[in-house]
Image (spheres, helix red, strand yellow):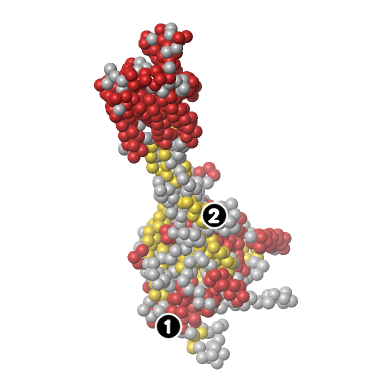
Amino acid sequence: MLCEMWITLNICLYMYFNHISGVFTSESCQLQGCFKLNGMYQDGEFIIGGLFEVQNLKVFPELSFTNEPELPQCEEFYMASFQQALTMVFAINEINSNSKLLPNITLGYQIYDNCLRLGVAFRAAMSLVSGTEESSNLSCTGPPPVIGIVGDPGSTQSITISSVLGLYRVPMVSYYATCSCLSDRKKYPSFFRTIPSDAFQVRAMVQILRHFGWTWVGLLYSNDDYGIYAAQSFQQEMQILGGCVAFSEMLPYDNNGRDIQRIAGVIQKSTAKVVVAFSTDLASLMDELLLQNVTGKQWIASEAWTTTPVLQTPQYLPLLGGTLGIAIRRGQIQGLYEFLKNLRPDKNPKNSTIRIFWETMFGCKFEVGGKKVDEQQERGRNKCSGQEDLNNSETAYTDVSELRASYNVYKAVYALAHALHDLVKCEEGKGPFTGNSCADISNLKPWQLVHYIQNVKFTTGFGDHVSFDENGDALAIYDVMNWHPRSDGSIIVHVVGVYEEAILGKVLTLDEDALFWNFETKKPPDSVCSESCPPGTRRARKKGLPVCCFDCLPCGDGEISNTTDSPECFICPEDFWSSPENDRCVPKEMEFLSYDDPLGISLTTASLLGTCFCVLVLVIFAYHHNTPVVRANNSELSFLLLVSLKFCFLCVLLFIGRPRLWTCQLRHAVFGISFVLCISSILVKTMVVIAVFKTSRPEGKTSIKWFGSAQQRGTVIALTSAQVAICTVWLSSASPTPHKNNQYIHSKIVYECAIGSVAGFSLLLGYIGLLAAVSFLLAFMARKLPDNFNEAKFITFSMLIFCAVWIAFVPAYASSPGKYAVAVEIFAILASSFGLLAAIFAPKCYIIILHPERNTKKAIMGRSTQNK
């Protein structure tokens, strides 16, 4: 860009000082010099300029500045480019014969060949805007030398020329310059184009990559404005897509062999299966790739080389077969083929390009300056008559099957014509300029036409709508091309889809059945740095590599990813957990000790079995209620103890099943009251044993009077009432409630009963423990009483079991998660209940059932008598 600015500055200074010099040295405008340029000319009321790449300048003359610089001589001849130039001529002739478009106005043209060189193109542009007449009136009235320029096709040339012409608002409508930089209205205010910008081209190519899932691609671009700007846009679009460029290489301007070999090596070593190329000259690189046998790559071609015939030869088929590319919209121009066939040369020196074409086409030579051609000098070339028949020639010149650039030329000419037509039709007082004025057709200013070009809208005979956006860009529409093999081994290019940017967004349409893939699988290749991460995993970028290179890490427990290539895992909501595949959240499993659970079934069975044992013992005692064993030590307390033990067994059922409010409230209350009733009965029985023993001695005969049946019942009721009071206060102040606990097991919801008040629960258990400790101490002190009527030792053993169970319960309960905590509590209840039942009632049942002879008062009192 600095080079462009330097060139522009020098040109502007040159023009300025030449103008000042002309004003002070002469009374007329004089040209300082005249460039020798090949071109075509037709006079008219308004002239449209044109710049085309018809020939190529390969050798520059030496600039020693010891004599006048020689004018460069252009070589070669491009038939396709000449067809484009003649399309402009055809369009102007068609407009002149159209009675509805610019009636009574004749358009002319001045077309120059830029020889594919910036210097020649700039000379041609200056010749167009300044005119080629030797002198003119200083008033400079009348229309400008040209009202606008069709061209230049090259981006670099257009940038430089438009930088200068934009200063004077001379409209320039290019048909092939695609650099996105030319959309900058501040730098290029009068530049328009009928070919989409590279920004659109890049987006079209990225959409193709996106369609096939190619996120890991190589990039090649030419060392010019076209390639550099296209590469920049491509990399930006790839970032938006989420793709990566595996390598980015600039093709050497001079096709340096060492650089070409290095680039070929990079392509061969790269893991990218897809290579994108923005260039107009790839022949040298392709030759090197063939030498190194670099195949198995999918090429994506920019519009610059998608339809070029240079690479469509049999030798390149193994390398370039199946290439996908985009091409500018193909159109049809009625009458163009006949016009091209009817071309004839004339002797006008301004139509030198036609004579060069004729000489190239037929291998002949025209007379120069009225002199005959020296046949020996021309090495056997015949003299051109100008009547040779073009109908017998089939070249790119007469091929109108792929009108792409030519069609853009056609639209560019019509855009200028329609803009001029709108300008001419302007009604005074309704114009767009200051004071609603219109342009003066006799003194037309270039900037006035720019306004109308910006707003031009028309439809071609082919049905395409032509208009320009605020940046001077045309509607973006491309054909998607695919390189197929011919029967002779060469390559033919087929249209397999369309890409267009409409109001609704980017639209890519592909006929995938028509695609040819140059791979053994006959399917599109995979071109990714890392395979996509499936749902249930997340991407983790590999250190030091692009974002497309990553590892797939599985989501953690409770986390999911439900999309491919998810950048992160998401935590499931509170009541949900990740599926085994970590690809969706599922409701957490509700865990509680249920009746269907094997553990629940076992505990329920034990509870019912204990209840049955209590009932059985109760039946036995009721049946033998008059026997001494049953009547000894207050049979009423024994029956009360059996009933309380039965409630202890049955309260277990409140701990099993889905926790509900009423079960949570009742389970600990029933458990606490039942056990207090049980322990208080045992306590009173122990006290009765001690009292009875004391009455057997002279000093304790009055003890039993103060602890009769009424006092025993009252003691049990009083002790139990205290527990009832504790439960009542607890349930009324901080009642236990069902609670979903996520802390024990994160993957499950443990449905449990929250105790509500720790103090209440602790007080309930503490009260039971206190009674059990007192009972144990009293029974322990009475353990040496006579064996025959001493029940204290069985109570001592039962209390020892009870205390041991509940002391072990505390750490086991605290360390058990979820439903197992409930199971531990149930086990403690059952173990202590079975311990009490077995230790206190098993010996009595043993005597009642198996040794009835010992169930007599004499047998019970016998030991006592002996002791006396």
Any mark on residue 388, and which?
Answer: 1
Q: Residues within 10 Å of mark 2 (few under 14, many from 20)?
A: some
Image-based side of 139 in relation to 509, left or right: right
Location of residue 772 in the rendering, given as x and y in whole percent from the top left corner: 46, 22
Q: Which element is circle 1 on? A: loop
Q: Quadrant of the C terminus?
A: top left
Residue type highlighted by circle 2: Arg
Location of residue 25 in the rendering, given as x and y in whole percent from the top left corner: 72, 63
Q: Quadrant of residue 404?
A: bottom left
Name which residue lies at 45% across and 43% down. 558
329 to 759, vertically: above or below: below
Residue located beneath label 2 in the image: 541
Location of residue 824 in the rendering, given as x and y in whole percent from the top left corner: 42, 34
Residue nearest the viewer, comparing 92 with 29: 92
849 to 146, vertically: above or below: above
Name which residue lies at 32% across and 28% down. 846
Point out the frontmost of discs 2 and 1: 2
Q: Is residue 829 visible?
A: no
Q: Residues within 10 Å of mark 1 (few under 14, many from 20)?
A: few
Q: Quadrant of the N terminus?
A: bottom right
Residue type highlighted by circle 1: Glu
